[in-house]
Amino acid sequence: MARQPRLDLPGIPRHVVQRGNDRQACFAADVDYGQYLRELQEAARKHGCAIHAFVLMTNHVHLLVTPTCLVAVSRMTQAVGRRYVGLFNARYRRTGTLRAGRFKAALIDSERYLMACHRYIELNPVRARMTTDLADYRWSIHGHDAMDRRHPLITPHRKYLRPGLTPATRQIADRALIREQLDEQQLTDLRLHTRQQRA
């Protein structure tokens, strides 16, 4: 079956999901998570992608990213995949792919959806019962947003940087926002739109 063409619009944020092959783990130890983030930071810079949010789960990755040019997201994910998978395979003396085919991506067409997607990404470890306190989960945007732990990978989206809000006020607002769980319809819509790769 032919691949469906992706909508690729520079300047429009998108929710990107990359899953492990056959739902297998993509990360085996802290060194792997750190390596992935370093590779992602380098590839995002090189290919013109601004990363606004991320979470690394055991067997998949969520990103909120805005490309500056055509095919930037594809080039970024390919670059990360080539480098990270090669290093992972060498570290664990394995062969083959880690990724389940192409990444999935949904265009984000409104501020409301942008903020819902940001929360969806940030709350993933809680929904997966990997932690009850996001402050304990090191591999997500949460420390950057809510706890003033600056992450060099992150470029806050302009909608997140509302005029008049200080960094301290934004942290308080983010902690309050995260306490508000997404409702079931929002969760369903986010998952469906990303899987179907539509806005």
Image (cartoon, grey):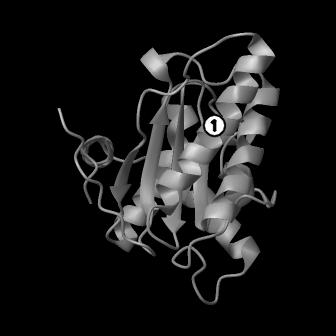
The answer to whether residue 138 of the structure is visible from this angle is no
Residue, x 59% and y 56% (percent of image)? 53
Residue farthest top in this picture? 93
Total marks shown come to: 1
Residue, x 58% and y 64% (percent of image)? 49
Residue farthest bottom in this picture? 164
- Measured from the top left, where is residue 137 in percent x and y? 71, 36
To which quarter of the image does residue 56 belong? Answer: top right
Is 134 rendered above or below residue 158?
A: above
- Specify few, some or many for label 1: CA neighbours under 10 Å numbering under 14, 14-19, or 20 or more: few
- Measured from the top left, where is residue 147 in percent x and y? 76, 56
Is 98 left or right of 83, judged from the image as shown? left
Is 32 rendered above or below residue 54?
A: above
- Measured from the top left, where is residue 20 in percent x and y? 50, 25
To which quarter of the image does residue 44 belong? Answer: bottom right
131 vs 113, nearest the viewer: 113
Specify the quadrant that holds the N terminus: top left
Specify the quadrant that holds the C terminus: bottom left
Residue, x 80% and y 18% (percent of image)? 91
The answer to whether residue 104 of the structure is visible from this angle is yes
Is 174 left or right of 111, judged from the image as shown? right
Amino acid type at image mark 1: Arg
Q: Give SS at disc 1.
A: helix
Is 119 left or right of 176, judged from the image as shown? left
- Measured from the top left, where is residue 74 in percent x and y? 48, 52
Identify residue for label 1: 82
Residue, x 43% and y 16% (percent of image)? 22
Is 155 left or right of 109, judged from the image as shown? right
